[in-house]
Image (cartoon, helix red, strand yellow):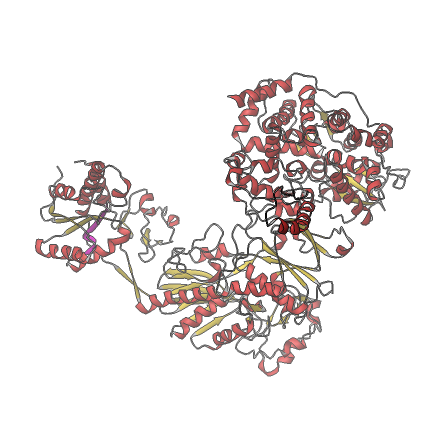
Amino acid sequence: MVSIAPEIRIGFYVCHCGHNIASMVDCPEVAKYVATLPGVALSRDYKYMCSDPGQELIQKDIREFGLNRVVVASCSPLLHEHTFRSAVAAGGLNPFFFHMVNIREHDAWVHTDRGEATTKAKALARAAIRRVVHHKALEVKRVPIHPDVLVVGGGIAGIHAALTLANAGKKVTLVEREPSIGGHMAKFDKTFPTLDCAACILTPKMSEVGTHPNITLWSYSDVVKLEGYVGSYTVTVRRRPRFVNEDLCTGCQECIGNCIYKEPKFTDEFNEGLGKRKPIYIPFPQATPQVVLIDPQVCLNFRKGVLADKCKKTCVEACGDRKAIDFTQKEEFKEIKVGTIIVATGFQTFDVKRIPQYGYGLFPNVYTALEVERLVNASGPTAGEVILRDGRRPKAIGIIHCVGSRDKKTNRWCSRVCCMYSMKLAHLLKEHTDAEIYNFYIDIRAPGKGYEEFYDKLNEEGVHFIRGRVGEITDWAVIPDEENKLVIRVEDTLAGFVRRIPVDMVVLSTGLEPQADAQGVRRLFNMSCGPEGFFLERHPKLAPVNTFTDGIFIAGCCQAPKDIPDTVAQAGAAAAEALALIDRGHIEQEPNTARVLADCSGCKSCLALCPYTAIGFDEATHKAVINEALCKGCGTCVGSCPSGSIVQNLFDDDEVFSEIQGVLAYD
Amino acid sequence: MTTPTPTTQPPEASISARHAPRIQAAVETAQVIKIQRTIKFESDRVRGFGRDVMSVPGCEQLESCIQCGTCSGVCPLSIYMDYTPRQVMALTRSDFKNEVLRSHTIWLCASCYACTVECPKQIRVTDIMYELKQRAIAEGIYPKRFPIPVLAREFTEMVMKHGRITEMLLVMRLFLKTSWLAAFGNWRMGIDLLKTGRLSLVTERIRQKGEISRMMDAVDRRKGS
Amino acid sequence: MKYAYFPGCSLKGLGRAYEESLLPVMRHLGVDLQELDDWNCCGATAYMAVDEAKACVLAARNLALAEKTGLDQVMAPCAACYLVLNKTKHYLHDYPAMRTTVDQALASVDLHYSGGTPVRHPLDILINDVGLEAIRRKVRRPMKGLKVATYYGCQLVRPYATFDDPYNPTTMDRLIEALGATIVRYPLKTKCCGGSLTGTVPEVGMRMVHELICEARKRGADCIATVCPLCQFNLDGYHSAVKAQFGDEMVPTVYFTQLMGLAFDLPEKQLGLKRAAVPFTWRPAPAPAAPVPVPA
């Protein structure tokens, strides 16, 4: 017979949960049984424990009967553990003297025999009674939240999040890898479905970021180290050398005009390789910050020997009094302290060279969608004229949907925006060239606001939509009309026959995928990712911008492919989540953390095992130390410690073993 | 067809007599174009056919078909087929066994694997075509003197008997069983082959003669069990 | 370098020029081929149309025989045989039920196949085992001025494209360039020739052959180089029918091994060049009197 100390007075409640539990478990019977167990001061059954009267009942009983332990047998702790802990606390008892037993999901809902279900409920209750005896008083921890925020990624998501936070009065550091913020959106010509000019709607926001007193913009920089925990992160940022002093450069661009390279010669990344730039350059006219930079790979000054002497440094001359150019600039490491982080690192487009059948690189007039955005853009390499690589102006254009997407050989998912941007490009190309435009699709996905209407508009403009996935592009001509053209052979599945359509230009609507360095980035920020590689949200429906690490949020295409409206919405949501933490000033942590006992031998086996990197090592005492703020109570270290020197609140050995003994009815 | 003159003369007879030429013209037009009413009822499906085909190893992926049309788009023979490969996939999945096994598609497939390699859902289209060919042959569903299944049958018989194929003998047996005219039509090629020393009528065979049939019997026994 | 050699029915019949040119070329390069004793027909596409299990058993008998020789690799020059043998290997590996059936059938004739012995194509062996360097050194009559359209057909590169790219294979191109010839761009290099359709459904088969020949001519090819006896037969044997129907000017179709034989200056009698219906008359310049090492 188990003996319990006389001062233990347990209050036991079994809930009917309406019919949910009572239909399968004989609750009065369970209550009667538990009343006979040692240590139990009172035992009740009640229809709805989670209701207000139910909670008040607990509070009243604690006071009236001097209860110092409470057990409720009802539904899942995920639902109401918090409710009952609060009720217990309101009754004047430490909330961690409470234990909850699930006799709904674990018992009533999975049994069909009333007798068996009731027996099991009794066993579970008995286990809980024995366990709760060993519960200790614990305090919820409060972790303060530093008010500053780090936003990683300066695309539209990062920009919107940064502005929202800055306007709320918080200090934001925005770190962007490229020399200018703007992300992919800065490269687009127009946006669907409104056909707003992308630059026109983006640049005011970029400008606001550049001048906002609460935003520190570090472009041409990346995060290299992250330490700390929610509310108290220490971030190390590497600022790469532009060889131009950002504070002194006024963006006049006279240096570019005076560069000894009279003609631009080097691959222009912003224009997707379609144009050329000089060694000293500004990525695009509206770049923010409005500062030039020098490419050390091609600038003569950085070559050794004879070549370096060849450069007369005419750029420095042009800069004159401003003296902004500094060839000796080195990379700098900066450290900042923030409380929350928003990761908005965006996407990369699918590499079409992985599908050689489409002829990219083999045929000069095969383009990717991003290349076409630059081609039709007024500030692009051809000033908006659609002139192809071989000089001709297209009379017929084929746009191929789903390149790289919906394909088990490349990316399984649908990239969500390609149907819409393919339609947009069809419209823009029609406008610029009046060519025959053919869109080859598998399904038309136009779910957003105004999207179906946009599709109607395209149909009215006479763009041909052919339902058939294109297998390959060929230069094999079967009839004279196909000579010197690119031929698209496709099954027109709706019309029911195979067609050959000669075009001058092929546009490949590439899908979206995670950035090339996404895995490295997510490990840096302690985030998980899904099977496709996109960063993992805490819950796909109810927590799309939270991650499994407190204080770190995600927004935009780094989480999954999406269009601009959804990206901006997510950025706002992430900012709101961060604001909620900051304005509350602290978060409360469940005290189910692990702690290292004095007999730790310093073997360090636990350090690498912690998925939350919460365990450190104190060289002075030669013992492992657990950071309570980072610890999530997963129990990995507890189970692995060879000397049993790590224990965990709420899961101490005596608690767990007595529970097991209770289930098995061991004495 | 003329409208028959009624023996008794009801008052309307004069009206129908007036309209007779127009009716006749309409009927004649109807015979110029051949109207066909096509509607498929659920009774046209052979339930379980699709499941059955997909249960064969190599054919499982057909469940994922999104009817994108890539297979038909890259198939070099699709332009000669009555149903395109994509349509055959849809028909198979929907249990339209008779339409599928009677199509030209399964016979015109040259198993070049272009479809299988391009399919975004990695459906082994070529292997499904083989499966359908096998079923059509097993059930005898093909025109009697159609060369392709006849060739398959003659091929397997020759291999069973001798273990190897003698191409010229195979071709001759094919012509015998399908079309004598085709044999004569290829006389020029026959001369060419003779001239270049490729016309060999000596039967190629393996030494262990009975081995092939013994192995095949073992397969039959296993299937029966 | 020693390999078990699986000729297949075609190389003893209509495709004998392939074997005739392959053997001396391999010998010249020091590759030792041992013909598989009592090999049987692989089944090609026809057997698979009748019964899948039996087709696998047929192919597996050859694999079992190859294993018995103790040689660790098989060379299968015919593209169809290459495909069937590799496909069978995959099936046996991926589908245990099929494996059991085949094992039992083989056991009934005291044979056993444990799953090893890769089956490779001569192109694979030439590029990867022998190496282009060794081949270049053996060239005594560089094929300078010859424009070749390399035609791989379908069975070699699809679906088990282990040694070359399925959409744009280049092994034969590199090999022929090593002989000194020029490759012309040929977009139809992996388009099916129609296989047995030329015989069974001529209105389809002939047109497919015509398309291949017409494009090769248009691209300026002096000849088409093939790896498959059925492709060679279709492109060559039906020439009069194709010319009658479509008016094509013929382009000679040769085996790549025949081109190698010419470049190595092997006796022409051994290369089976006379077996083609459309004669290939182009010859490289005669070899210099004393052998000079050809610069790499």
Query: Looking at the image, which is closer to me, B63 or A514?
Result: B63
Q: Is residue A31 left or right of residue C138?
A: left
Does C19 appear above or below B119? above
Query: Looking at the image, which is closer to me, A225 or A555?
Result: A555
Query: Looking at the image, which is closer to me, A124 or C219?
Result: C219
Q: Residue at x 25, y 54 (%)?
A: A80
The number of discs equals 0
Does A449 appear above or below A614? below
Q: In the figure, residue A53 lies in which quadrant?
A: bottom left
Q: Is residue A585 left or right of residue B52?
A: left
From this viewpoint, is residue C182 visible? Answer: no
Q: Position of residue C251 (x, y in %)?
A: 83, 42
Q: Position of residue C93 (x, y in %)?
A: 55, 32
Q: Is residue C266 magenta?
A: no
Q: In the figure, residue C40 lies in which quadrant?
A: top right
Q: Position of residue B74 (x, y in %)?
A: 66, 46
Q: Residue at x 64, y 66 (%)?
A: A429
Q: Residue at x 60, y 37 (%)?
A: B100
Quadrant holding the N terminus of chain C: top right
Span highlighted in magenta in the image = A94-102
Q: Is residue A603 left or right of residue A117?
A: right
From this viewpoint, is residue C210 visible? Answer: yes
Q: In the figure, residue A124 lies in which quadrant?
A: top left
Quadrant holding the C terminus of chain C: top right
The residue furthest bottom is: A321
